[in-house]
Image (tube, rainbow, N blue to C red):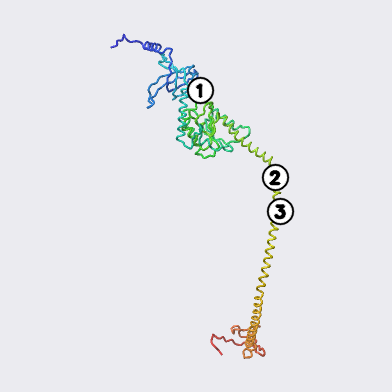
């Protein structure tokens, strides 16, 4: 059992630990592979506090953790690392670090980070980038291609718009790059007008790739006929490009049906999104300049075409006039020849028809004379028959004429100069005239007796 006399102060124990650490690790440094976690940067004093952790590769469970610091010398090495690799010193990065073991009785055991090996990270980033490219090729046939060592995509092969006017601008409003793009576009020297629709999204940091993909999906869903989509990033650290190497964003860019132009502020290596995009430029300002130059190129083509037309039109018209003159002369000569040939042909036809007609008439003249004789005889016979018939009809008419009828005892009654056919037309007092075969008698009607279908005679 430990007696009270055997106890020591905590500080004495920590000094013993400090002495052991000093004896064991003094003047020694170690290169360790660890993952950054809980990173905090104090810009006022220019140092980092963080934890270094190691996880099991299979289960991702925590194996060990230790606090670490980065003082000014280490911060300078980190900035060099970021510049060389294009990767920001951040959480969740697995790095090869040069560390020194330190122990302070007030702050405990820590690792002081002296340097970061960029070659380890470059190799790891290159390996991860290649794995992403391989996955894109495998899972997106027809949308991602590799030909003679050059990557291409469905988006990269989009047809270049004749003129770029409608632009979907995707980026973080308020950043320098976003403002630079709009300023360059709106104040172009040629007075070109553009329709720019803004789609705000973070372009760096954790989850930025998924936010950009969401905006691309939104642009498609609106069904606006944009000429291009511009993805711009500026005003932040040049090293934070991890979002543009992600599989999700690179896949969305590769398969997008509208041409995409990237200007994400990198100065060295191309991101995978750059490789998949229709056009890739270094900065937002260069993206704006590219669009303006594209439209200027089209305008220059129109002006050149107009100049060529103005220069060549007179000569072309003159040549065509000469061609028409020669064609007209040749046509007139041909028409004369054609007319002469057809006139000869028509004369031959006329002579042939006349000869055939005369021959036919001579062959049929005897038949015509016989027919004429028969017609004359038939006509005389018909005239005799018709004369006899008319004579008989005349005799018949004489027998039934009014004079013959009146001589047979009949009379005609007139009233007011009109022939009376019905007794009902007369009334007592009517003056009538009776016509006999040898004269007329006037009389007054005293009584009218009407018959009713019976014979009153």
Q: Residue at x 70, y 51 (%)?
A: 330
Q: Residue at x 70, y 49 (%)?
A: 326
Judge left or right: residue 10 versus residue 220: left
Residue at the outermost left position? 1
> In the rendered image, which quarter is residue 411 located in?
bottom right
Whole-angstrom CA distance, mark 1 to mark 2, is 66 Å
Q: Label 2 belongs to which residue?
A: 319
- Where is residue 71 drawn, in percent x and y? 47, 17
Figure quadrant of the N terminus: top left
- Where is residue 334 drawn, in percent x and y? 69, 54
Looking at the image, is mark 3 or mark 2 earlier in the sequence? 2
Question: In this rendering, which labeled residue sits more in front, label 3 or label 2?
Answer: 3
Q: Are marks 1 and 3 in contact (CB under 8 Å)?
A: no
Q: Nearer the viewer, residue 89 or 301?
A: 301
Q: Are marks 1 and 2 in contact (CB under 8 Å)?
A: no
- Where is residue 15 drawn, in percent x and y? 39, 11
Q: Label 3 belongs to which residue?
A: 333
Q: Label 1 belongs to which residue?
A: 84
Looking at the image, is mark 1 or mark 2 earlier in the sequence? 1
| Total marks placed | 3
Q: Is residue 269 above or below residue 300?
A: above
Is residue 16 something one can see in this rendering? yes
Q: Tell me the SS state at disc 1.
A: helix
Q: Are marks 3 and 2 in contact (CB under 8 Å)?
A: no
Q: Nearer the viewer, residue 200 or 223?
A: 223
């Amino acid at each position: 059992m430990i007696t009270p006399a055997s106890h020591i102060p905590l500080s004495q124990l920590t000094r013993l630990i400090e002495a052991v650490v000093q004896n064991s690790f003094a003047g020694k440094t170690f290169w360790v592979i660890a993952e950054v976690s809980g990173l905090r940067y104090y810009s006022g004093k220019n140092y980092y506090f963080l934890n270094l952790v190691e996880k099991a590769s299979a289960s991702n469970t925590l194996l060990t953790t230790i606090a670490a610091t980065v003082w000014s010398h280490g911060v300078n090495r980190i900035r060099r690392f970021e510049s060389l690799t294009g990767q920001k010193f951040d959480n969740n990065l697995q790095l090869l670090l040069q560390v020194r073991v330190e122990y302070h009785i007030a702050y405990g055991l820590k690792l002081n980070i002296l340097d970061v090996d960029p070659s380890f990270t470059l190799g790891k980033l290159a390996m991860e980038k290649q794995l992403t490219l391989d996955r894109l090729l495998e899972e997106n046939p027809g949308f991602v291609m590799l030909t003679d060592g050059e990557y291409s995509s469905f988006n990269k092969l989009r047809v270049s718009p004749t003129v770029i006017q409608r632009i979907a601008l995707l980026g973080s409003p308020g950043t320098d790059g976003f403002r630079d793009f709009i300023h360059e576009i709106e104040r172009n020297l040629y007075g070109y007008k553009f329709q720019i629709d803004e789609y705000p999204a973070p372009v760096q940091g954790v989850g930025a790739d998924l936010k950009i993909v969401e905006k691309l999906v939104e642009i498609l869903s609106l069904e606006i006929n944009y000429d291009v989509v511009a993805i711009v990033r500026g005003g932040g650290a040049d090293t934070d490009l991890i979002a543009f190497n992600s599989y999700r964003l690179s896949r969305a860019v590769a398969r997008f049906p509208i041409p995409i132009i990237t200007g994400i502020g990198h100065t060295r290596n191309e991101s995978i999104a750059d490789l998949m995009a229709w056009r890739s430029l270094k900065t937002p300002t260069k993206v704006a300049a590219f669009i303006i130059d594209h439209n200027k190129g089209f305008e220059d083509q129109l002006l050149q075409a107009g100049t060529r037309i103005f220069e060549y039109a007179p000569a072309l018209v003159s040549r065509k006039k000469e061609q028409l003159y020669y064609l007209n002369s040749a046509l007139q000569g041909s028409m004369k020849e054609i007319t002469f040939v057809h006139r000869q042909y028509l004369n031959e036809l006329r002579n042939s028809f006349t000869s055939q007609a005369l021959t036919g008439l001579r062959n049929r003249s005897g038949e015509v004379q016989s027919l004429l004789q028969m017609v004359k005889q038939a006509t005389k016979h018909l005239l005799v028959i018709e004369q006899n018939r008319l004579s008989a009809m005349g005799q018949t008419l004489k027998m039934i004429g009014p004079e013959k009828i009146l001589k047979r005892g009949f009379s005609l009654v007139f009233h007011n100069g009109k022939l009376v056919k019905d007794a009902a037309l007369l009334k007592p007092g009517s003056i009538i005239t009776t016509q006999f075969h040898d004269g007329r008698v006037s009389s007054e009607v005293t009584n009218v007796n009407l018959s009713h279908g019976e014979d009153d005679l």
